[in-house]
Amino acid sequence: MGSPESRAWAAGGMVFAASAALVMGVWQIVMGIAAVADDGFLVVGEEYLYDLDTTAWGWIHIVLGALVLLTGFLLFSGSTFARSMGIFFACLVAVDNFFFLPYYPLWSLIVIALAVFVMWSLATADSRDL
């Protein structure tokens, strides 16, 4: 199970993960809407290997953001299914932002770090501690 201190961090992290999922979902949706509405919003150099149309990136962000937002609401229940979905979608957010690095590098790194913490806390927290 781990030490009481570790369990406290994980339980606090789980509440934080649920809150962070709500915020990440909204941010992903807003970024997606901006990309769909204005093709010039996202600009990257010509040599980027994973070059997608900005409208495609926008729709990816909108759909993923909606799923993360829904999962954030479900995480407050503490159910195992919600935790599993939270880990899955946090992983997708991290991968999405890895491919998004050339567009907004600092922002992408912050979101990746947040997603990794969310995955850790959801994987280690004991739902009985909530």
Image: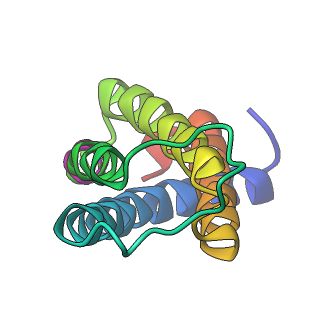
Q: Where is residue 7 in the image (x, y as percent from the top left)?
A: 68, 50
Residue at image coords 58%, 65%: 103
Question: Colour scheme used in the picture?
Answer: rainbow
Q: Does the magenta stretch include residue 89?
A: no
| Residues shaded magenta | 67-71
Q: Is residue 26 above or below residue 21?
A: below
- Nearer to me, 53 or 108: 53
Q: Where in the figure is residue 121, as x and y percent of width and height? A: 61, 48
Residue 47 drawn above or below residue 35: above
The residue closer to the viewer here, 18 or 25, is 25
Total count of labels? 0
The percent coordinates of residue 29 (x first, y second) are 25, 62
Image quarter hosting the N terminus = top right
- The image quadrant that residue 123 belongs to is top right
Instruction: Give the side of residue 74 with respect to residue 10, left or right.
Output: left
Front in this rendered view, residue 12 or 1 = 12
**Residue drawn at (32%, 33%), measured in percent from left and top?**
82
Task: Looking at this view, name the residue that lies furthest to the front.
Answer: 46
Q: Classify 16 as above or below 88.
A: below
- The part of the image, by quadrant, that contains residue 18 is bottom left
Name the residue nearer the viewer: 62 or 112. 62
Magenta: main secondary structure = helix
6 relative to 71 in the view: left or right: right
The location of residue 65, given as percent across then percent down, is 29, 52
Looking at the rendering, which quadrant does residue 52 occupy?
top left
